[in-house]
Image: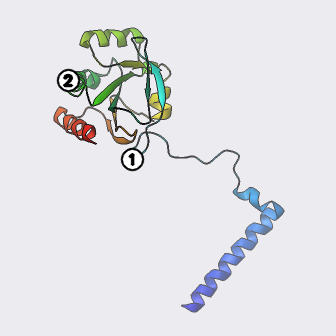
Amino acid sequence: MKRNIIILLVILAAAATVIYKQAGDEIQSVFKTEQPLPVEVGAKAGMLSPTFTLEGMNGGSYSGGGVREKALLINFWASWCEPCRQETPELIELARQYSEELDIYGINVTKYDVEKRARAFADEFNIPYPLLMDEEAEVFEALFKGQAFPTSVLIDRNGVIQEVLVGLPEPAELRKKVKRLTSL
């Protein structure tokens, strides 16, 4: 056993010598990079929600991220998305039922939609919660690393992401998740 450890140490020392001889006095440059190493970003449970501000269809300005008075459900959608159309009545009902404990922001990813159609969608459903316009998909793509529509992000009052739901959740399951979120 002792002999194996000595052999391993000799191999490591030889490898270090080879690396040093190839790099010379510039040994540190072997381990340096011009760009910073990537860090984990995007919406994941347990992480703080990214901070953002977007303009709403009503002309107001809305922000997310950080500590809030109410929990927040962010729903990324597009007017052409059939599952988005199917879940909208449930989101409207949740907005009414949990108005004291939950904010809902419907974020239209306008980069992949047409604003005129998004406004028609909002009028058709008479959506009571704020609808925000992510014109260049900066919030959806860059901050939340969104991949599909619909995507809903459940964020507690402390600004911590509790869950990311990609696709159309079952209404009963979504209700359970919102109930749990608002009780945190």
Residue type beneath disc 2: Glu
Residue beneath the point at 67% across and 44% down: 35
Question: Mark 2 to mark 1: distance in Å?
Answer: 27 Å
Question: Which dot marks residue 174?
Answer: none
Residue beneath the point at 70% across and 57% down: 31
Q: Which residue is mark 1?
A: 46
Residue 29 found in image quarter: bottom right
Report how many numbered discs are placed on residues in the image: 2
Q: Tell me the SS state at disc 2.
A: helix
Q: Nearer the viewer, residue 98 or 19?
A: 98
Q: Nearer the viewer, residue 46 or 5?
A: 46
In the figure, 139 relative to 44: above or below? above
Q: Earlier in the sequence, mark 2 or mark 1?
A: 1
Residue situated furthest bottom in the rendering: 2
Residue 10 x %, y %: 67, 82
Residue 180 x %, y %: 23, 41
Residue 48 found in image quarter: top left
Q: Nearer the viewer, residue 170 or 46?
A: 46
Q: Which residue is mark 2?
A: 93
Q: Quadrant of the N terminus?
A: bottom right
Residue 183 x %, y %: 24, 40
In the figure, 49 relative to 36: above or below? above
